[in-house]
Amino acid sequence: MAELASVSGGQQWRKYTGGSEPRELNMHVLFFMAARLALDPDQLQAIANKMQDIGAQVDTDALVRLPGELQA
């Protein structure tokens, strides 16, 4: 889940799922996770290309590639 959400690791992800006051998952993070699960690589690449067109520096390989266990 941490890799899907592009957070730095399991310890960061646990801040959203545990403890006495779990961190709220922001809409943009949830949207990013859902997009990576719902869209195919070509669609994600089109989004990355548009992001670059409007000035972002995007690691397109990281955006388009799903975490290993989710590719199956």
Image (spheres, helix red, strand yellow):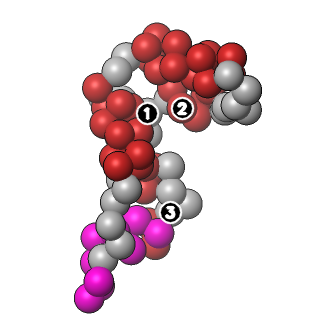
Residue 46: mark: none
Between circles 3 and 2, the one closer to the viewer is: 2
In this view, 6 is above or below 18: above
In reply to whether residue 13 is colored magenta, the answer given is: yes
Q: How many marks?
A: 3
The secondary structure type at the circle numbered 1 is loop
Q: Tell me if I can see residue 16 in this picture.
A: yes
Q: Which residue is mark 3?
A: 9
Pointer 3 and pointer 1: residues touching (CB < 8 Å)?
A: no
- The spot of residue 46 in percent (x, y) is 52, 13
In this view, 67 is above or below 41: below
The secondary structure type at the circle numbered 3 is loop
In this view, 67 is above or below 10: above
Q: Earlier in the sequence, mark 3 or mark 2?
A: 3
Q: Which residue is mark 2?
A: 63
Q: Which residues are magenta?
A: 12-21
- Classify the position of the C terminus by image quarter: top left
The secondary structure type at the circle numbered 2 is helix
- What residue is drawn where x is 40% and y is 65%? 13
Identify the image quadrant of residue 2. bottom left
Tell me if 33 is positioned left or right of 63 in this view: left
- What residue is drawn where x is 41% and y is 49%? 29
In reply to whether residue 19 is colored magenta, the answer given is: yes
Q: Which residue is mark 1?
A: 66
Which residue is nearer to you in this view: 2 or 49? 49
For badge 3, the amino acid type reads Gly
Q: Name, please, the residue furthest toward the front.
A: 54
- The spot of residue 24 in percent (x, y) is 32, 67
Identify the image quadrant of residue 35. top left
Q: Earlier in the sequence, mark 3 or mark 1?
A: 3
- The spot of residue 64 in percent (x, y) is 51, 26
For badge 2, the amino acid type reads Leu
